[in-house]
Amino acid sequence: MENKNIELTENDMSVAGNVKHKGRGPQFVIYLGKLLRMFIYQSDWKVLPMAAVIAALVCYVVGDNLFKTMEGTLLGCFAVSCICIWNGFFNSIQVICRERAIIKREHRSGMHISSYVAAHMVYQAILCLGQTLVTMQVFFLMHVQFPTISLVTGIPVVDIGITIFLTTYAADMLSLMISAFVRSTTTAMTVMPFLLIFQLVFSGGFFQLHGTALTFTNFTVAKWGLTALCTQADYNSLPMVSLWNSMEKMREVEIEGQQPIKELLAVAEEQDMKEQILLECAKNNQNEKYAATQDNLLNCWAKLLLFIVLFSCLAVGALEYVDRDKR
């Protein structure tokens, strides 16, 4: 079965490359058709159930507090960004480098690299859209409480879906670019963990970064995906529960024979001040970059779109010289 699939790939690309009158448009159609057949015959469809499993695991761990508290939202949005990065990387990390020899031969025969990469871009966009829909459906099934405000489309769920799609697709295009640069699938799979760690560490939200390290966050897909999600969740208006929970754990602590924390909590509960205390704690931990404004969200989307265009252009540039290498 594997040999049959390889022959199919070579035949499709030979048709596009050797027929001289084939322009970029017809070649694009041929490549896209090949990729859609691979979705069925080479089991590329498996990325969809994998996305569902990953989303379900994340919801099981952080879903209860996602979009409800500051801490839960930051952790949950970080986890959702991880889902997007993970899905995007695995979609395309090997798709170009595994057929590099074929690309090199067919490029010399007249294959247009731009048509080849464009077909991959459309195909990967379809995969990312499918993963986004699957992820959103899992969120619904696991009763994740979505934000009630919409900053752009008027429908909060649609806003969140666009952010998840753009984050996944930007990570996908980064992975596609890496696949265009590296020499083999082994190298691609070796590089991928370092890229994943870099994206997560320099997301700019979960880990405390300062100085130069903070500057690096602007060059990560994870940073803009996380910021967009926290913006849509209206992070700065949510209660902060860490202090209250810590005091609850110390309720029975005795100091010189007295229990001051227990007495303080009792007074707060009797006067129904808990919610006010949580909101006051939140006021001292607001983050300007998560301000729930349309401009803030559109800026995040624009940065993700910029990454998509940049990575795809670099992939084309790398493959334009594929017939010159000695690999």
Image (cartoon, rainbow, N blue to C red):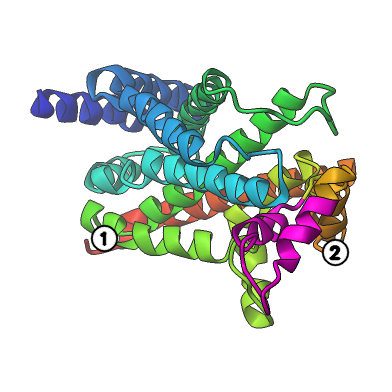
Q: Residue furthest front?
A: 257
Q: Amino acid at mark 1?
A: Thr
Query: What residue sits 63% from the left and 47% below the top?
Result: 72
- Indicate the position of residue 321 as horizontal and vertical percent values: 40, 57
Using the rendered view, name the quadrant where residue 294 is placed. Answer: top right
> Which quarter of the figure is the C terminus placed in?
bottom left
Q: Which residues are magenta?
A: 240-267
Q: Amino acid at mark 2?
A: Asn
Q: Quadrant of the N terminus?
A: top left
Residue shown at the point (71%, 45%) measured from the top left:
69
> Percent from the top left, x then y, of residue 52?
42, 27
| For marks 1 and 2 on the same chain, the one whose residue lies earlier in the sequence | 1
Q: Residue at position x 28%, y 61% from top?
A: 190
Q: Nearer the viewer, residue 143 or 91?
A: 143
Q: Residue 251: x and y, percent?
A: 65, 59
Magenta span includes 113: no
| Residue situated in front as seen by the camera: 101 or 275 | 275
